[in-house]
Image (cartoon, rainbow, N blue to C red):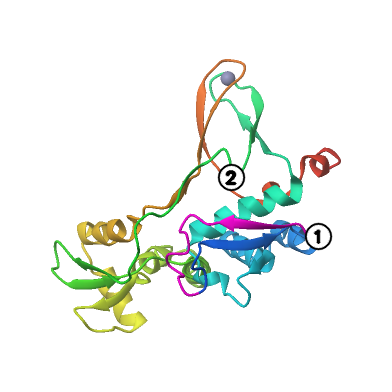
């Protein structure tokens, strides 16, 4: 029998009101198939997380995980890990000060600073660019956008033999633009527009669309048990994240 858990997601479903009106989804534990997927190299990192959470999503039924904000997907991933292994996530940290390695354990998501949405969210947001003066309609990126950006950025880099590595950055901005001076531009038009933006305008678009009041702080502070130096590490849900302590011990 699968272990299932109801999870209150950080966005409280405010970007998916029709399907998630109460802000809760239901997830189940990982099976061997998903654990294998997590450690395979077939999928790109974000794609892996979104795919695995999508497979473990029990409710709402027939909901496309790509429409959730990535923060919610990562939060769900933590809960899935929790009900699968029922133990903290442990990883090795090498202390740069005394050169000793130590193990740090973190309970996800309980040890992390999570902020739940308070305000109602209504997309698109209007923004006027400080330099160019254009009026934009903007939206938040969803998990599906992040997966697409990662994949397309990678394809472009491979096709250009490593010359064009900026495409993902262009997409990061252009995917947020839904209208340009009251018109609905084509993806190609938006990309061209973004390429010509000033740094100030690009920053403005980022600020408007990242000013959410919900999120997870993935920065972990830890103290070296030997010399006392405080380290800051960014929590990356990589392949090791989905190996239990027991399986790590046996290789
Ligand atoms: Zn140390």
Quarter of the image holding residue 90?
A: top right
Which element is circle 2 on?
loop
**Residue 11 is one of the magenta-drawn residues:** yes
Q: Is the residue under label 1 in contact with that under label 2 (CB below 8 Å)? A: no
Quarter of the image holding residue 122?
A: bottom left
According to the picture, the residue beneath numbered tag 1 turns out to be 32
Tell me what residue is drawn at x 37 percent, y 52 percent.
213
Dot placed on the residue nearer the N-terminal end, 2 or 1: 1
Magenta stretch, residue numbers: 1-18
The x and y percentages for residue 238 are 63, 50
Residue 183 marker: none
Tell me what residue is drawn at x 30 percent, y 77 percent.
190
- Mark 2 vs mark 1, foreground winner is 2
Tell me what residue is drawn at x 75 percent, y 47 percent.
85
- The answer to whether residue 42 is visible is no
Q: Residue furthest front?
A: 22
Residue 109 marker: 2
């Amino acid at each position: 029998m699968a272990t299932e858990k109801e999870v209150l997601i950080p966005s409280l479903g405010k970007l998916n009101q029709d399907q998630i009106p109460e802000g809760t989804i239901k997830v189940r534990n990982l099976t061997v198939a998903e654990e294998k997927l997590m450690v395979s190299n077939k999928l790109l990192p974000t794609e892996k997380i979104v795919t695995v959470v999508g497979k473990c999503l029990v409710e709402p039924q027939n909901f496309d995980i790509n429409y959730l904000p990535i923060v919610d997907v990562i939060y769900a991933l933590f809960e899935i890990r929790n009900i699968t292994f029922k133990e903290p996530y442990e990883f090795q940290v090498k202390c740069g000060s005394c050169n000793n390695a130590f193990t740090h354990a973190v309970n996800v998501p309980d040890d992390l600073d999570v902020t739940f949405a308070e305000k109602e969210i209504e997309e698109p947001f209007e923004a006027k660019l400080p330099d160019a003066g254009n009026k934009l309609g903007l939206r938040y990126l969803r998990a599906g956008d992040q997966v697409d950006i990662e994949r397309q950025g990678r394809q472009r880099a491979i096709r250009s033999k490593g010359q064009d590595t900026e495409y993902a950055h262009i997409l990061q901005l252009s995917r947020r633009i839904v209208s340009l001076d009251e018109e609905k531009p084509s993806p190609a038009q938006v990309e061209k527009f973004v390429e010509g933006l000033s740094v100030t305008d690009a920053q403005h678009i980022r600020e408007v669309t990242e000013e959410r009041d919900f999120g997870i702080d993935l920065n972990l502070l830890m103290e070296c048990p030997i010399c006392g130096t405080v380290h800051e590490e960014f929590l990356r849900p990589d392949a090791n994240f989905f190996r239990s302590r027991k399986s790590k011990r046996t290789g």
